[in-house]
Image (cartoon, rainbow, N blue to C red):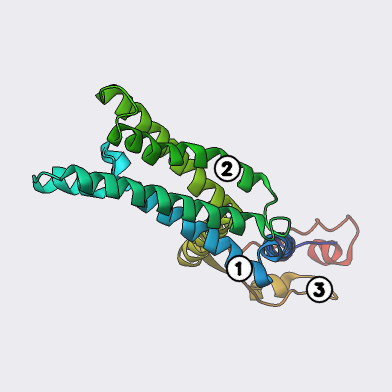
Amino acid sequence: MDFRLADIEANLSKAAEIKELSEEGATDQQGAIEELSWKSEVGGGEEFGRWSALLTSMLCALVHLPALALESCWPSLLGQIFSFNVAPPVLVTSHWVALGATLIFISFNFGFLAAGAKQRRGLLPLVLAIAGSWLVVLNPIYYLAEDYHYTSDPGHERDFIVGMLTIVGLVMLVGASSWNASLDKMILEMWGQHGQTRSSLVGGALGAHVLVANDSESDDNAPMGANSSPTVDTVHPPVTMQEYAPMTPRTAPDPPGSPKLAGKDA
């Protein structure tokens, strides 16, 4: 049985398309199942709890933002920026306000992390937040102790250590709230969707359009009863391809004593 090159190319192209579609469907189905599984963890009435915990941690970080500049409070930071002196009573009041705001925000943060923790990421974010909160509360307590002369003369080395511990505590507190809100999975999902969109656009722009057609000359030379393949229009992924000229099938030579040879001899 004679096979034409066009038939082989058409069959191979169809097989590749079927395999690609099946793999794509399996991947999409598995990704959809994983997406629904983690979204169910934070869905429903737990939305308020996860975003509220993240909001309270960000407000606590905003209160202690001057620690990045190794300053005790906002009035002290603004005095350094705009070059004006801050009265000691203002600093004491600011430290008390920072302590009260820190305790309020941390208390609400613990409550939001604990409420519905089993439906989200468990109790580990709460444990991490508790560990970081001690370092955050240390900042206003330390400066209040300096204001009321419960410590020795202030030193820059000690202020630097307290500031670094405060930053570490804030990172732990915000990280625990982000973990509780499943921000890591949201970022990975957005990154995956961006990658799929980009790959599809590149594939559509660089894809090769190949037309596989029958050769009329080959059909005339083909034996009677041979199957002729229809025109197949397929789109292949962007790969390096070579175009082949239409080829006619090779036929076996006629055996000795056939009617054709007898006619020629005559």
> Where 14 falls versus 182 (above or below)?
below
2 or 1: mark nearer the eye: 2
Residue type highlighted by circle 3:
Asn
Residue type highlighted by circle 2:
Ile
CB of mark 3 within 8 Å of CB of mark 2? no
Residue under circle 3? 227
1 or 3: mark nearer the eye: 1
Q: Residues within 10 Å of mark 2 (few under 14, many from 20)?
A: some
Residue type highlighted by circle 1:
Glu
Query: Residue 118: image x %, image y %?
Result: 73, 56
Q: Element at badge 2?
A: helix
Query: Residue 212: image x %, image y %?
Result: 62, 70
Distance between the alpha carbons at the discs numbered 2 and 1: 21 Å
- Left or right, 129 with reference to 11: left
Q: Element at badge 1?
A: helix
The answer to whether residue 38 is visible is: yes
Q: Element at badge 3?
A: loop
Q: Which label was assigned to residue 47?
A: 1
Query: Residue 64: image x %, image y %?
Result: 35, 46
Q: Earlier in the sequence, mark 3 or mark 2?
A: 2
Residue under circle 2? 130
Give the position of the N terminus as an image quadrant.
bottom right
Write the residue at 36% across / 27% down. Answer: 161
